[in-house]
């Protein structure tokens, strides 16, 4: 057998591609179209961020939606027109400063200044400063590395459990990229060095670091930046976005607790902890004419929970490591499900016909959660929804029996019972009758000619015990006429509706038929029979011996 012929080796296609590319480019240019180079481009990461900002900071177009803002010393919910991208870069620097509390528990000061006229924002904290030291691998100072170079972070070791907000190495750099000027200042007491460096032109330029000596007791970090408003299609720091920024500062006062003094534009924020913070929302809602309860529990060092009432739509205000999770997430579900399950059990025990479901109970709850989660994961860089599984939280939040009892006594159970009663009544009303001259779909009904008409109050409906009794009644009607008499036969013993459940009433065809024949409506109080199809009711039964005495019902 002859050996198989060897295939020739593959030839390089570079020359062919080059020739084809030149031909295509020439053809495109001749036709007035784009060249290959214009069609297919490679961007640096910095260029990509500026070109596609929505991937990193969210939309740079103005959005309007109902949000909570801080105005006049109070929380206010109203339609807010803001640019999510601008709000996000502010939040990245704010969360970065708050994270220092986790690294250095002795941190006790957070200061935020928003200069609207000068379009300048500064955020300061007095936790451990950034190490003023040259990174031996990158050969630059650490402050420049973490604030001026993308994908740099101290949060990449997933084997280390951290309860900080930063994770992906973008954070503060995004604020730098979307600013015309960005200044990083830090005092490193351990190395007794103070550092200052200025970035400009969207992180495209940087000054040489200024390094001076500082005291060993001096530790702080301050970031000052001027947002590049043109990148957000804005000309000034508008009132709505400033109100949102101020709200986030108040958030920090609530989530960091009483050990950190939070200042906004030189004034101390008068919120000493999460319970005080929640009260801002309660006060705002109570102004609308109802006093809302506030049930609070500090479960442990990582979980704080507060509950109030809602009106049919679930509401939540939640935080993970200082980040405002405006769309909630797994941490909110974890807490809300515990509360709703307990309340659901109480409601179903009080009214066995309620058949209450978990999602219905949640609609009557307003839940506030402040949590510290190990290495949190979110749905996107904007971090609006926590996606970390409960098993990976790094802690548990088991609500106490006392707390759950207080929630049940807060008014939510009575609200749900009222809702259940309303729902049951609404279902029963679907079987209501009305005053009309003719009805169809009821087997064996012999309707009076004047039933439902102007002489309906003169009509009598005869209920008979079975078909044999109906025949007797029809014989009598043959004598007196059908204008004012109707007949409907019953099947066996009629349901006693006084003790009947909602399910029994809904499934009992005879009761529903009688309501339609008479024109009866559920829970309506009648002072006359003018609104009914019949003015009188006669029950015709067989003779039944009730006792040994000769007493009979006819």
Image (cartoon, helix red, strand yellow):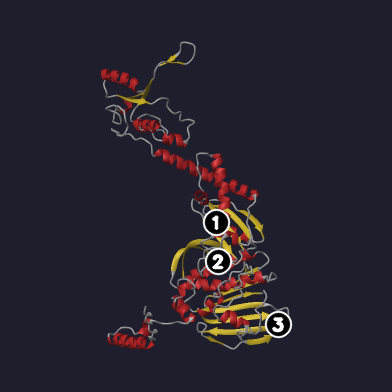
**Can you tell which of label 1 and label 3 is closer to the viewer?**
1
Indicate whether 461 appears above or below 222. above
**Can you tell which of label 2 and label 3 is closer to the viewer?**
2
Residue 245 image offset from top left, x and y in percent: 54, 69
At a point 44% along the width and 78% down the height, the residue shown is: 51
Secondary structure found at label 3: loop
Number of the label disc, if any, that sits on residue 333: 1
Q: Quick one: label 1, few (<14), some, or many (20+) residues within 10 Å?
A: some
Earlier along the polypeptide chain: callout 1 or callout 3? 3
Residue 165 image offset from top left, x and y in percent: 59, 69
Number of the label disc, if any, that sits on residue 377: 2
Whether residue 267 can be seen here: no
Indicate whether 7 appears above or below 302. below
Indicate whether 452 appears above or below 142. above
Cα separation between marks 1 and 2: 15 Å
Q: What residue would you read off at disc 3?
A: 191
Q: Quick one: label 3, few (<14), some, or many (20+) residues within 10 Å?
A: some
């Amino acid at each position: 057998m002859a050996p198989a012929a060897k295939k020739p080796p593959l030839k390089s296609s570079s020359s062919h591609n080059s020739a084809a590319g030149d031909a295509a480019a020439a053809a495109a240019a001749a036709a007035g179209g784009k060249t290959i180079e214009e069609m297919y481009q490679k961007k640096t990461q910095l260029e990509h961020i500026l070109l596609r900002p929505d991937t990193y900071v969210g939309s740079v177009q103005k959005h309007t939606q109902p949000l909570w803002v801080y105005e006049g010393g109070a929380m206010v919910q109203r339609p807010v027109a803001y640019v999510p991208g601008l709000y996000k870069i502010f939040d990245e620097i704010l969360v970065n400063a708050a994270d220092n509390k986790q690294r250095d528990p002795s941190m006790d000061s957070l200061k935020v200044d928003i200069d609207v006229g000068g379009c300048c924002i500064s955020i300061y904290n007095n936790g451990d400063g950034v190490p003023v030291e040259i990174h031996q691998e990158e050969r630059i100072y650490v402050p420049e590395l973490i604030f001026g170079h993308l994908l740099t972070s101290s949060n990449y070791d997933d084997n280390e459990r951290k309860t900080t907000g930063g994770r992906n190495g973008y954070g503060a750099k995004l604020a730098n990229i979307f600013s015309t000027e960005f200044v990083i200042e830090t005092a490193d007491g351990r190395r007794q060095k103070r550092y200052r460096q200025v970035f400009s032109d969207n992180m495209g330029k940087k000054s040489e670091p200024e390094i001076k000596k500082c005291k060993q007791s001096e530790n702080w970090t301050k970031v000052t930046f001027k947002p590049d408003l043109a990148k957000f299609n804005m000309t000034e720091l508008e009132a709505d976005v400033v109100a949102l920024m101020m709200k986030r500062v108040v958030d920090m006062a609530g989530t960091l607790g009483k050990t950190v003094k939070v200042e906004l534009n030189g004034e101390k924020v008068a919120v000493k902890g999460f319970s005080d913070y929640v009260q801002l929302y309660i006060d705002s809602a109570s102004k609308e004419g109802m006093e809302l309860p506030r049930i609070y529990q500090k479960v442990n060092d990582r979980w704080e929970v507060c509950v109030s009432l809602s009106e049919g739509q679930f509401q939540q205000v939640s935080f993970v490591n200082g980040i405002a999770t405006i769309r909630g997430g797994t941490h909110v579900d974890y807490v809300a499900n515990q509360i709703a399950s307990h309340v659901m059990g109480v409601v179903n025990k009080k009214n066995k016909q309620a058949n209450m479901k978990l999602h219905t109970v949640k609609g009557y709850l307003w839940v506030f959660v402040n949590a510290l989660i190990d290495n949190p994961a979110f749905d996107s860089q904007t971090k609006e929804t926590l996606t970390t599984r409960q098993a990976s939280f790094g802690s548990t939040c088991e609500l106490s029996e006392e707390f759950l009892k207080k929630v049940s006594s807060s008014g939510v159970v009575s609200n749900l019972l009222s809702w259940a009663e309303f729902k049951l009544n609404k279902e029963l009303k679907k079987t209501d009758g009305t005053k009309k001259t003719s009805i169809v779909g009821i087997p064996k009904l012999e309707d009076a000619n004047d039933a439902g008409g102007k002489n309906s109050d003169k009509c009598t409906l005869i209920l008979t015990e079975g078909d044999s009794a109906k025949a007797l009644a029809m014989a009598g009607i043959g004598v007196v006429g059908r204008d004012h008499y109707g007949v409907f036969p019953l099947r066996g013993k009629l349901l006693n509706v006084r003790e009947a459940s909602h399910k029994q009433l809904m499934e009992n065809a005879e009761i529903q038929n009688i309501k339609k024949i008479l024109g009866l409506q559920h829970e309506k109080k009648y002072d006359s029979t003018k609104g009914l199809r019949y003015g009188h009711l006669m029950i015709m039964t067989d003779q039944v011996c009730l006792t040994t005495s000769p007493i009979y019902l006819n």
